[in-house]
Image (cartoon, helix red, strand yellow):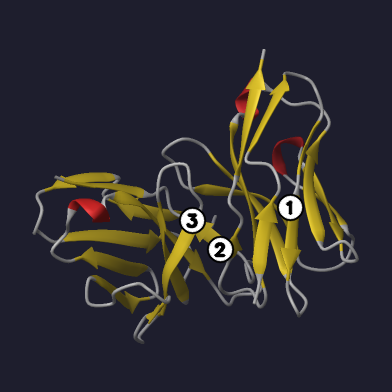
């Protein structure tokens, strides 16, 4: 149980285009989803936290107009990288958490999406 | 503010040897502590977690960790490593079960 999927697993796009990444909780309702960014050989940096039905909370230094996050349902959150540039190339990982007693206080991570902007 | 320090960026070890990956944290309140493993080009997998209770926590793949409040540490140990344990390991802290703060990661390299 507690499986999180991401789609696509990798994407290559041209500079200036927008890319949407989906994060789904497959067998539980995720009241909160988190989006992380990871550069090679580095740790995960939290970009934003989203609660179902409300606006995402962005970490300091993350451009909310560039990284659009939508959490419209309890099983789906999307991250859209708008007008992507080569410096946005990175590994994006989502995680999902729930308020249910079984898995409270734990986040479940998706497999990640490798974005390469040419 | 919370922070997590993983004291070793790389740990090379021979197969079947014991290993300890060190993690120290700072926080002004009670915390939840986690260890995750990441294989290349994959997401994170939870190894073990400390929420409360016994300070010795056992996880998957033979790993265990001990919560030491006085030393603000949560070191990860395994008595005998395998080649398949080669991966990146992240220690993380959360104050309320919400936002996770990660350490810098430790690359464990198990050699035959």
**Is B35 situated left or right of A45 in this image?**
right
Q: Which residue is mark 3?
A: A44
Q: Earlier in the sequence, mark 2 or mark 3?
A: 3
B56 lies left or right of B5: right
Q: Which residue: 41% across, 43% down?
A: A40
How far is the residue under mark 1 from the one under mark 2? 19 Å
Q: What is the distance, in whole Å, between disc 3 and disc 1 at their CAs?
A: 16 Å
Chain letter of disc 1 in the image: B
What chain letter is assigned to the residue under label 2?
A
> Label 1, on which residue?
B23
Label 1, secondary structure: give it: strand
Label 2 Cα crowd, 10 Å radius (few <14 / some 14-19 / many 20+): many
Mark 1 residue crowding within 10 angstroms, few (<14) / some (14–19) / many (20+): many
Give the distance between the C-alpha atoms of the residues marked 2 and 3, in whole angstroms: 14 Å
**What SS does tag 2 mark?**
strand
Which image quarter: residue B54?
Answer: bottom right
Query: Residue B38, relative to residue A27: is it above or below?
Result: above
What secondary structure is marked by label 3? strand
Name the foreground residue: B81 vs B111: B111
In the image, residue A41 above or below residue A51:
above
Rendering coords of residue A58 (x, y %) = 39, 78
Most extreme residue toward the bottom is A54
What percent of the width, then of the height, locates residue B58? 80, 48
The residue at which mark 2 appears reads as A107
Q: Which mark is residue A99?
A: none
């Amino acid at each position: 149980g507690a499986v999180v999927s991401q789609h696509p697993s990798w994407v290559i796009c041209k500079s200036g285009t927008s890319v949407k990444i989906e994060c789904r909780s497959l067998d539980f309702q995720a009241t909160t989803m988190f989006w992380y960014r990871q550069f090679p050989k580095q740790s995960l940096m939290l970009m934003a936290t989203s609660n179902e039905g409300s606006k995402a909370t962005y970490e300091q230094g993350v451009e909310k107009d560039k990284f659009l996050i939508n959490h419209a349902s309890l099983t789906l959150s999307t991250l859209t990288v708008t007008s992507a540039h080569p410096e946005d190339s990175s590994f994006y990982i989502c995680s999902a958490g729930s308020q249910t007693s079984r898995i409270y206080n734990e986040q479940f991570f998706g497999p990640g999406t490798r974005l390469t902007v040419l | 503010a919370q922070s997590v320090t993983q004291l070793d960026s790389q740990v090379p070890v021979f197969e079947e040897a014991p290993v300890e990956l060190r993690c120290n944290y700072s926080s002004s309140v009670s915390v939840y502590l986690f260890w995750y493993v990441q294989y290349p080009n994959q997401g994170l997998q939870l190894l073990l977690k400390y929420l409360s209770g016994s300070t010795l926590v056992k996880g998957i793949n033979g790993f265990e960790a001990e919560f030491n409040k006085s030393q603000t540490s949560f070191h990860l140990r395994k008595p005998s490593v395998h080649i398949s344990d080669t991966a990146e390991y992240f220690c993380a802290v959360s104050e309320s079960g919400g936002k996770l703060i990660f350490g810098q990661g430790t690359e464990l390299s198990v050699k035959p």
